[in-house]
């Protein structure tokens, strides 16, 4: 079995599973609308019981599917350069050279993809090969074709700021926050070009607010920017925001409602 598309493509398969911490949801896209076909609470695709695996495999059938993984296993870096080569291969080499200066592990053990964010900025995304193989092996064991392996954060970044949700226009949020179990990912952008990304852990609403404040202060101190709009995508967090409107008000952020978020949120998670 060969995964022929990694991380993101606007030609994402019509059927895909979003796999997070403790929850899995399967969707089909028809006429630009997402239809939830199946969802289940699970300790993970690779840890589910044989009965649950068989039941899910039978629902997926023998059609081609994609898998979009939450960001727990992924490593993100945004690099700015004085100059960028036009060649995609040269850009990958340049990102790997920069990555070797800050990343202590063996890059050969990871799938490494590089995305041009515009200007002279690159996004480096790493996924351990062992994690990709485990997902691929699960689909192979259920005899379900897997043709796409994606990442929810990259998917959201592309759809928010890469033209996926064209109806946002000038109302594009300056911050995107994704939350799944105890993992948070905050991405900051200006002129639809992400410039800062941070992963953090939080196990309560208080910890969540503390981490967001810390990140906002860092961005203000290091980038001289004070963003005020946010798009929030709660997957299956380990806690709920008691009063979301008050939370954003206390953080001095204005929430932006984004259509199509059912793919990356769990009902009742906010």
Image: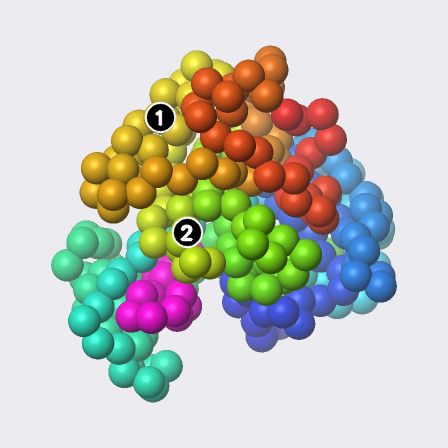
Residue at horizontal 66 percent and vertical 67 percent from the top: 12
Give coordinates of residue 227: x percent, y percent.
Answer: 40, 40
In the depicted view, which residue is nearer to us: 136 or 250?
250
Magenta range is 115-128
Residue indicated by mark 1 = 213
Locate residue 84 relative to residue 50 in the image: left or right.
left
Pick whichever of labels 1 and 2 is earlier in the sequence: 2
Q: Is residue 54 above or below residue 251?
A: below
Residue indicated by mark 2 = 189
- The answer to whether residue 60 is seen in the rendering is no
Residue at horizontal 71 percent and vertical 47 percent from the top: 259
Locate residue 152 relative to residue 115 in the image: left or right.
right
Locate residue 232: give its quadrant.
top right
Locate residue 260 relative to residue 31 in the image: left or right.
left
Q: Residues within 10 Å of mark 1 (few under 14, many from 20)?
A: some
Badge 1 element: helix
Residue at horizontal 71 percent and vertical 67 percent from the top: 13
Image quarter where the C terminus lies is: top right
Q: Is residue 118 above or below residue 240?
A: below
Locate residue 11: give its quadrant.
bottom right
In the depicted view, which residue is nearer to us: 17 or 152?
152
């Amino acid at each position: 079995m060969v995964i022929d598309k990694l991380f993101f493509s606007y030609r994402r398969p019509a059927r895909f599973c979003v796999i997070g911490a403790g929850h899995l949801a399967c969707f089909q896209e028809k006429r630009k609308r997402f239809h939830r076909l199946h969802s289940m609470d699970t300790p993970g695709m690779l840890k589910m019981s044989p009965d649950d695996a068989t039941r899910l495999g039978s629902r997926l059938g023998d059609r081609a599917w994609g898998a979009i993984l939450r960001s727990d296993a992924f490593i993100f870096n945004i690099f700015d350069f004085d100059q960028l080569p036009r060649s995609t291969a040269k850009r990958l080499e340049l990102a790997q050279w920069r990555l070797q200066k800050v990343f202590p592990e063996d890059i050969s053990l990871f799938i490494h993809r590089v995305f041009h964010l515009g200007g002279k900025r690159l996004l480096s995304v790493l996924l351990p090969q062992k994690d990709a193989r485990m997902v691929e092996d699960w689909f192979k064991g259920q005899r379900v074709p897997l043709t796409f392996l994606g990442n929810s954060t990259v998917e959201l970044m592309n759809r928010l700021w890469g033209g996926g949700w064209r109806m946002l226009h000038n109302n594009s949020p300056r911050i995107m926050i994704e939350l799944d179990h105890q993992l948070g990912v905050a991405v900051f952008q200006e002129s639809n070009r992400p410039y800062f990304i941070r992963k953090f852990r939080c196990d309560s609403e208080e910890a969540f607010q503390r981490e967001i404040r810390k990140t906002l202060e860092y961005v203000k101190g290091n980038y001289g920017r004070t963003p005020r709009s946010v798009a929030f995508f709660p997957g299956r967090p380990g806690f709920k925001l008691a009063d979301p409107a008050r939370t954003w008000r206390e953080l001095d952020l204005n929430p932006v409602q984004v259509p199509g978020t059912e793919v990356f949120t769990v009902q009742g998670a906010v």
